[in-house]
Amino acid sequence: MKLNLTIQPRFRIGLLPITLLALMGVAFVVAMIRFIYGIGAISDLSYSYPWGFWISFDLFTGVAISSGGFLMAGTVYILRIKEFRPLLRPSVLTAFLGYVMVAVALLVDLGHPERIWYMMIHWNHTSVLLEIGICVMSYLTVLAIEFAPVVFEGLKWGRWAHFIHRFIMPFVILGVVLSTLHQSSLGSLLLIQPAKLHPLWWTPILPVMFFTSAISIGLAMIILESSLSSRYFQRGLEIHLLEKLAKAVPVILVVYGLLKFSELAWAGDLKYLFTSGLMSILFWAEIIIGVVIPIILFSLKRVRQNPKALLTGAIILLFGMILNRFNVSWFAVQHPDPMFYLPAFMSNVHYFPTLPEISVSLGIFSAGILAFGLAARYLPVFEQEQL
């Protein structure tokens, strides 16, 4: 007797969701081991090397790729350029999920995650970390409020959605201010280590450099998110809007490049451009990939009007700028030489990310992708489709 079982389409799970769920499961198990046995059980971090893959990928990169939210919110609500409204909700959702992922990653990375709330009652007014922590929590709340109307519309609670829309402007302004402060303060956090960060990256205008690069990253993320979601959800691509965003990218990157090389010349650090070995290679890699190539690509009209070329340019830009975040927070940070006298706990300066460390970040990132997919499927995220 032959038994024929048919799974209804609504219960079918594709390969991508299964892969994401598997990565999330591995990350959950690893995180539980970390919470039970301590951070040393899963990572290669130490007292002398407290910052590693998690900080570079989850924090510095996660915050940067979330910058599209405040760019679109400011453009639509404050500048009142309504034609970009179709890009607003996906950008806010991406930013909200990005900051949630940053918060979750910090819980795994902190030595005592159960004390994360101490920051709110034991203020250190001289620490940039206080400002970063307050901005993360505050902006995450603002993003939740900005995205709430989408949830209420999905639940058919139109009255609540309309109520929030009436008072959304103050929250948008607050969100732009908070995000501006947060994007730049990540650079301020590195100002404390002029003797450790390589001269090719350390500069007193690091906050300005971080904010400027975050704008280009935000524009690239909007292009990436729109391009991928249009393919995965079989929806139209707002190529006429993405073309306008891409047109602004070369302007931002030219400003970023001028700031970068002008400061190096002013500080007398141009001599390190070709004489620093691996550091020189990393520097030119991020400049060529994250600045030069995107400027060339997005300056060409045929690239801006071609969906595949537009997506390729966005990926290249993101890769180069993410390399910058890794350079400035990890690769270019020089640790004490153990040949000199140092306290015993600082003698081990070697670090290489472990597989559990990487699996945690991949799991958190997978959760963000899955959450975006579920929201896009069951909520009116793509506004033009509900008109």
Image (tube, grey):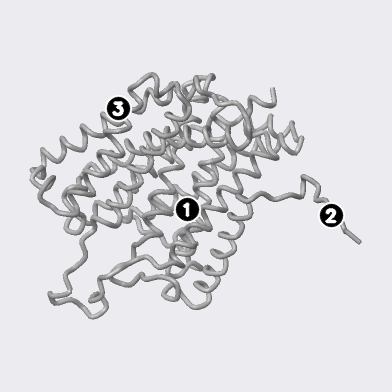
- Quarter of the figure that contains the C terminus: top right
Label 1 or label 2, whichever comes before in sequence order: 2
Place residue 180 in its image quadrant. Answer: top left
Kindly state the secondary structure of the residue where label 3 is placed: helix
Three-letter amino acid code of the residue under disc 1 = Val
Which is in the foreground here, disc 1 or disc 2? 2
Q: Earlier in the sequence, mark 2 or mark 3?
A: 2
Left of 280 or right of it: where is 170? right
The image's mark for residue 51 is none
Closer to the chain start, of discs 3 and 1, is 1
C-beta proximity under 8 Å, tags 2 and 3 = no
Please state which amino acid type lies under the numbered disc 3: Ile
Amino acid of disc 2: Leu
Residue at 13%, 45% (x, y): give it: 273
Residue 175 x, y percent position in the rendering: 48, 37
Instruction: Quote the CA–CA distance across marks 1 and 2.
Output: 42 Å
In the foreground, 238 or 145: 238
Mark 2 element type: loop
Q: Is residue 4 above or below residue 218?
A: below
Above or below — where is 345 with respect to 110?
below
Instruction: Name the residue tied to disc 2.
Output: 5
Residue nearer the viewer, 166 or 14 = 14
Residue named by callout 1 = 102
Residue at the spot x=45%, y=37% of the render?
Answer: 221
